[in-house]
Image (tube, helix red, strand yellow):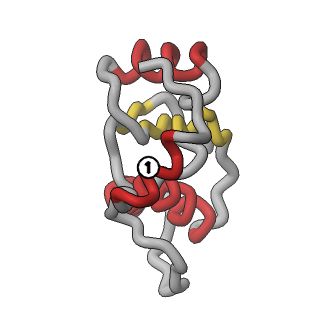
Amino acid sequence: MIIKAYLKPQCGWSNGVRAILRKHNLPFEDIDIINNRANYAEMVQKSGQPLSPCVEIDGVMLADISGEEVENYLLGNDLVKPTEIALDVATNAGCSDDEHAKMATKTIRFF
């Protein structure tokens, strides 16, 4: 499986996607859309919209998706088997207002 994950370096939704991919031991390309303008433009062009995370699995683009939704796609298409591995992050939640404020001082915004 070839997986490209268009993610923010720090984000509740992005961390949930990472957690699911790691839970299922899937190798993936973690593409930073915050600090690299070309990566963000590629995500928008491929997904047809500006929201993240976006995950491309074997050429299928899952746009504006949570970790929970990625796992449902993987399970629903028999790409992974169910597992009871516990996760230390939420797979269907954004960042708190405090986390967003903290990130605003550390990242470069292109949008």
Residue 13 makes an appearance in the image: yes
- Please tell me which residue lies in front, 7 or 94: 94
Q: Residue at x 40, y 18 (%)?
A: 44
* Position above or below: 1 against 25: above
The image shows residue 20 at horizontal and vertical percentages of 51, 64
10 Å crowding of disc 1: few (<14), some (14-19), many (20+) = few
Residue ID for mark 1: 101
Q: Nearer the viewer, residue 41 or 104?
A: 104
Q: Quadrant of the C terminus?
A: top left
Where is residue 57? Give x, y as percent. 50, 39
**Dot 1 lies on which element?**
helix
Quadrant in the rendering for residue 99: bottom left
In the displayed structure image, the side of residue 80 where residue 36 appears, left or right:
right
Quick one: 110 or 23, which is closer to the camera? 110
Q: As shown in the figure, which amino acid type bears the numbered disc 1?
A: Ala
Q: Is residue 41 above or below residue 43?
A: above
Which quarter of the figure is the N terminus placed in? top right
Measuring from the top left, give residue 94's x and y in whole percent. Answer: 35, 57
Task: Identify the residue at image location x=52%, y=35%.
Answer: 6
Query: Residue shown at 62%/34% (left/top)?
Result: 31
Asked if residue 72 shows in the view, the reply is no
